[in-house]
Image (cartoon, grey):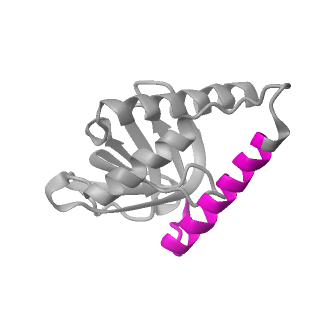
Amino acid sequence: MSLFPELDSASFDAELPFSVQPLPGGICPARQERETRLALRVLAAPTETLPEADPMLVRLEAKLDLALEVSLLSRHPERPPLTPCRLGLDSIAWISDHANHGSEPVLVALCPNPDSALLLFLAARINTVTPGENGNYLIRADIAGAFDETTRLLWEKWVFRRHRKAILER
């Protein structure tokens, strides 16, 4: 995925369920903002399990994770297609078959990993569209305005965590 432009911050590359649609008015609907905020709370939560952790609490957490995923699968039965992308703190880039989004506001919907039913909805403004290989386009968009103060911190924590993981996997 080295085709992507460098982003101005920590970032990571992935192939995630990802879709883009026009966003009239440029503002994410309140229901989708709320869902994103709740999903980011889950993603930014501590991931380390202490050796002295109570096995019953670990099991309860696993059950809650399962209940969340099952309920979200029924809420969002259609999943976006897997799309190569690069996610950063203030911008994202992805590969698309078409370049018809222009500079109008768009709503990006993405799952944090290919197996998750969690969906994040981000209001974005496309900055650049560059012809890529095989007739595809490399698209870069600004997402700095997609977050309020709380969700920005959660997004940053998640992106930094994935960025560090990508460095360790090299």
Q: Position of residue 140 (x, y in %)?
A: 37, 43
Q: Where is residue 66 in the image (x, y as percent from the top left)?
A: 68, 59
Q: What is the quadrant of residue 49 in the picture?
A: top right
- Residue 71 horizontal/vertical position (percent): 57, 67
Q: Is residue 104 above or below residue 14?
A: below
Q: Which of the pair 100/66 is nearer the observer?
A: 66
Left or right relative to 61: residue 72: left
Residue 159, position in %: x, y?
52, 33
Q: What stretch is highlighted in magenta?
A: 57-83
In this view of the protein, which residue sits in the foreground, 67 or 109?
67
* Quadrant in which the C terminus is drawn: top right
Q: In which quarter of the image is residue 30?
A: bottom left
Residue at point 59%, 59% (across, down): 68
Quick check: 117 left or right of 105?
A: right
- Residue 45 in magenta stretch: no
Is 82 colored magenta in this rendering? yes
